Image (tube, rainbow, N blue to C red):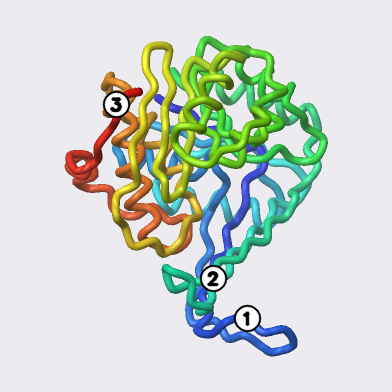
Amino acid sequence: MIASVTLNPAIDYTVALSEPLTSGEVARASDHRYDAGGKGINVSKYLVELDVGTVATGIAGGFLGRYLLDELSSQGIRADFVEIDGQTRLNTTILDGSGTENGNGEYKINQNGPEVPGFAIDEVVDVLRAHEPETVVVAGSLPVGLGPETIDLLAEAGPWETVVDVDGPTLRALEEPYALCKPNAEELAAATDRRIDGPRSALTAAQELRDTGFERVVASLGGDGAVMVTPERELYAPAPDTEVVDTVGAGDALLSGVLASRAAGEPDAEALRSGIAVASRVVSVSGTRAPSLTGVRDDRESISVSAY
């Protein structure tokens, strides 16, 4: 079983406009939706669709926190969150008709989230121990009052293997050994002080990052696909030709596909293919709702993986 930990979850508000944003003018929404979000929660959403056992935990508070928990329940996602007095954040994505190559301009406005008291982390540890997961995924930003040592504490608190999907500076500050990390290109660059301008440079940086205490590094490169560095191999998979509607949740989808494949005992190349296949399905819909992933294993057949 895989437990996701989202210490700074959000309600993801996605609004689509029929025309470009113009300063001083009222914009009318042609469509909008609210999704329970946060990187760890997204991973659990996709794992449910992939028929992998999962529980989502973390910190929630206020009326948005209650809405988040209600949404998870309505979607059949097992959740066991620690509740605090602060307010869960609201993250906004605006899609307008400004005519980029995929037809939409995309703007993101993310709140910082509440200040989290230290005792809440002790309660998260208790939740994890109660569920006895084989893998714990700690993903997303850290709320006010918490630092990288919080993630190290979660990693050493039980017999589980720990996977992280956090920003570059946080990756650099972690001290415990980790089974896997999943930066994007910007996070990988920040973690290694290297310029990432394609798969080859990403592989070099990922190998450098792996040597600091990560058994495996999977780096998402947007339209360039993804790389994976393992103790034995360096792998690259290009992104398939997919109509991109919304990139929110793409990295989380990639990670969930990799984790699902690893949980099934599949080799690293298949895990990378699975991650690319799941991400391709997710970017084809708006918001962070999980699309149908039925038949996604068949999608892997068209995804090539190169070994370096």
Seen at 36% across and 27% down, the residue is 235
User: Do the numbered discs 2 and 1 sit on residues whose CB atoms are within 8 Å?
Assistant: yes
Callout 3 amino acid = Ala
Callout 2 amino acid = Gly
Please tell me whether mark 1 sits on a helix, a strand or a loop: loop
Label 2 vs 1, first from the N-terminus: 1
Label 3 vs 1, first from the N-terminus: 1
Pick out the residue farthest to the bottom: 25
- Is 58 above or below relative to 249? above
User: Do the numbered discs 2 and 3 sit on residues whose CB atoms are within 8 Å?
Assistant: no
What residue is shown with label 3?
Answer: 269
Please tell me whether mark 2 sits on a helix, a strand or a loop: strand
Callout 1 amino acid = Leu
How far is mark 2 from mark 1, CA to CA?
Answer: 9 Å
Seen at 41% across and 64% down, the residue is 245
Q: Nearer the viewer, residue 203 or 115?
A: 203
Say which quadrant the C terminus sits in. Answer: top left
What residue is shown with label 2?
Answer: 105
- Is 94 above or below relative to 124? below
Q: Position of residue 175 (x, y in %)?
A: 68, 14
Q: Position of residue 29 (x, y in %)?
A: 54, 81
Q: Position of residue 292 (x, y in %)?
A: 28, 53
What residue is shown with label 1?
Answer: 21
In the drawing, what numbered circle is on residue 182?
Answer: none
Quick one: label 1, few (<14), some, or many (20+) residues within 10 Å? some
Tell me how many marks there are.
3
Q: Can residue 58 be seen in this snapshot?
A: no
Label 2 vs 3, first from the N-terminus: 2
Q: Quadrant of residue 14?
A: bottom right
Say which quadrant the N terminus sits in. Answer: top left
- Is 107 above or below relative to 307? below
How far is mark 3 from mark 1, CA to CA?
Answer: 42 Å
